[in-house]
Image (cartoon, rainbow, N blue to C red):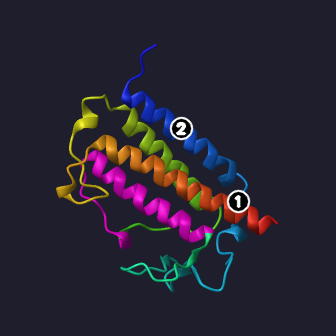
Amino acid sequence: MSTTRCEVLRWQFELVWSLFELHLERLQPDDFLWEPAELCWTMHETGSGGWVPDWAEVEPEPIPVPTMGWLTWHIGWWWSVALDHARGDVPRGRADIAWPGPGQPTIDWLRGLHDAWHEVLNQLDDTDLDTNSAFPWNAEAELTLAHMIAWVNAELMKNAAEVGQLRLLRAA
């Protein structure tokens, strides 16, 4: 049986997503802003009803523990920008990615990103995977769309594990 690179990347993505869904379907609105440590990064409601993340251009030392809210914003941010790159759109800036807030709105947003990414992956063939992609690296890296898709899968797996671990800690 022969398997294309696209099929392997799609399979890996759906495997990672199924693991993330185990946690998403169990998240409650109060989970998102639970602060697991004194030093943490979270989301802050603005006066206009939006949300802004804690952020630093240079990662601080020690690294703050993220809340589930911050992690879900982070996933939505990098995934939205990855979608922009994969579609050939002008990539949005970090401040242009709006977190919907705690609970079902964020879960629905992430599931929508899953569906959009799934559509992008289903339109690709192995030849497409060899096109250049500067995201999330710089243009000098000479990496391909296949590298970006593999990075999305790895980043989603890492962030899903972080959300899951926080959810389990909070439940304990």
Above or below, comparing residue 54 to residue 108 in the picture: below
The magenta segment is 68-95
Q: Which residue is mark 2?
A: 14
What amino acid is at disc 1? Leu
- Place of residue 84 in the rendered image (x, y in percent of width and height, measured from the top left): 31, 53
Q: Which mark is residue 110?
A: none
- Place of residue 103 in the rendered image (x, y in percent of width and height, measured from the top left): 65, 64
**Which secondary structure, mark 1?**
loop
Quarter of image, res 106: bottom right
Quarter in which the C terminus is drawn: bottom right
Spatial CA distance of label 2 from label 1 is 20 Å
What amino acid is at disc 2? Glu
In the picture as drawn, the residue positioned furthest to the right comes out as 172
| Left or right position of 74 against 42 | left
Query: Around disc 1, counting alpha carbons within 10 Å, would you say few (fewer than 14), some (14 to 19), or many (20 or more)?
Result: some
Q: Which residue is mark 1?
A: 27
In the picture as drawn, the residue positioned furthest to the front comes out as 61
Query: Around disc 2, counting alpha carbons within 10 Å, would you say few (fewer than 14), some (14 to 19), or many (20 or more)?
Result: some
- Place of residue 60 in the rendered image (x, y in percent of width and height, measured from the top left): 45, 82
